[in-house]
Image: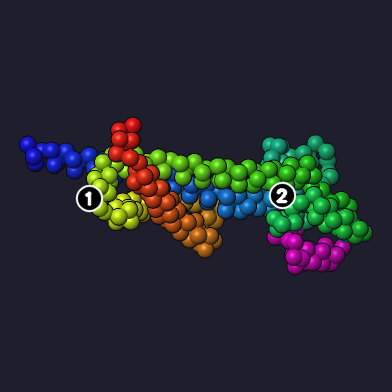
Amino acid sequence: MGRSFEQYQKQKLISSYFSVVLSIGLVLFLLGVLGLLVINTKKMADHFKEQITVSIFLKDEAKDSETDQLRKTLAMAEHTKSATYVSKEEAAEKHSAEIGEDFQDFLGYNPLKNSIDLQLHANYVTPEEIELIAADLSEKSYVEEVSYDKPLVGLLSENVKRISFWILVASGIFTFIAFLLINSSIRLSIYSKRFIIKTMQMVGATKTFIRLPFIWTNVKLGMLGAIMAMLALGATLFYMDETFPELMLFEDLEMLAVVFSSVFLLGILISLVCTYFATQRFLNLRTDELYY
């Protein structure tokens, strides 16, 4: 009978520990995902910004030397990610492939212009910067027109600012919620041992002596939960990298190390703080208050 009760108590203890580890792991995983999202918001925004093309259409009388010189100058400029020359013939082939028929047969000639497709580094994809670049290029005598999607550039810049702000707000709120959830799990775990705490206190044990085993136990549980969260984060990162390789999620290893280290340290810190205050609460209660 005694062995059966002992086994039941051990199973109950393991179940309690498992629920604490699981709750800490899930909360830290979600917190880590949010951290990765915050870090990669700029990277994702930069990726979309750098897909915007500024088309520089050249006049028919533009000399090959002028065109080649412009392309080389643009390629060397600090704002340029790539500068690609597109002949009117290549543009016609591409347009015909898109519409599914050769428009030159209908028109009898090729109305398109030779052009240079310019893609900028993300920092320069703002309405003000592109406007300055376009104005400078338009002044050249052999450039007929500089074209880009102005509404899209404005909308992209505005949305990036708005999304970044709300992600930061959500991060703050979620960190607070994470603390509350982990605190609740640990307090429930310690609540079941409140009579043991009070018994130890009544036989003369100091508060520090009583508190330390609980803190150490829950810090270890916090570590296990953090490791679980880190493994889940790693798996998620590998999956995302395989699905969206253009995001280059493993390019900035230092920032990833910061996120993973933060998750681990948060698991320890939150467990330590929550355990301290939970045990302190029961240590300060009178014996008759333990029943409420």
Q: Quadrant of residue 72?
A: bottom right
Q: Give the amino acid at mark 1.
A: Val
> Which is more N-terminal, label 1 or label 2?
2
Residue 77 magenta: yes
Is 9 above or below relative to 58?
above
Q: Which quarter of the image is occupied by the C terminus?
A: top left
What residue is shown at x 87% (from left), y 59% (from top)?
Answer: 136
Pair 2/1: label in front: 1
x, y percent for residue 7: 14, 41
> What is the magenta range?
63-85
Residue 52's disc number? 2
What percent of the width, then of the height, locates residue 241? 49, 52
Circle 2 crowding by C-alpha within 10 Å: few under 14, some 14–19, many from 20: some
Q: Element type at marker 2?
A: loop
Q: Amino acid at mark 2?
A: Ile
The image quadrant where one finds the N terminus is top left
Q: Which residue is mark 1?
A: 203
Q: Residue at x 27, y 49 (%)?
A: 201
Front one among 226 and 93? 226
Judging from the image, what secondary structure is the residue with disc 1 in? loop
> In this orientation, which residue lies closer to the viewer: 97 or 154?
154
Q: Residue at x 68, y 53 (%)?
A: 50
Query: Mark 2 to mark 1: distance in Å?
Result: 74 Å
Residue 260 seen from this side: no
Which residue is at a point 57% across and 53% down the rendered structure image?
39
Q: Is residue 42 visible?
A: yes
Is residue 21 one of those drawn in magenta?
A: no
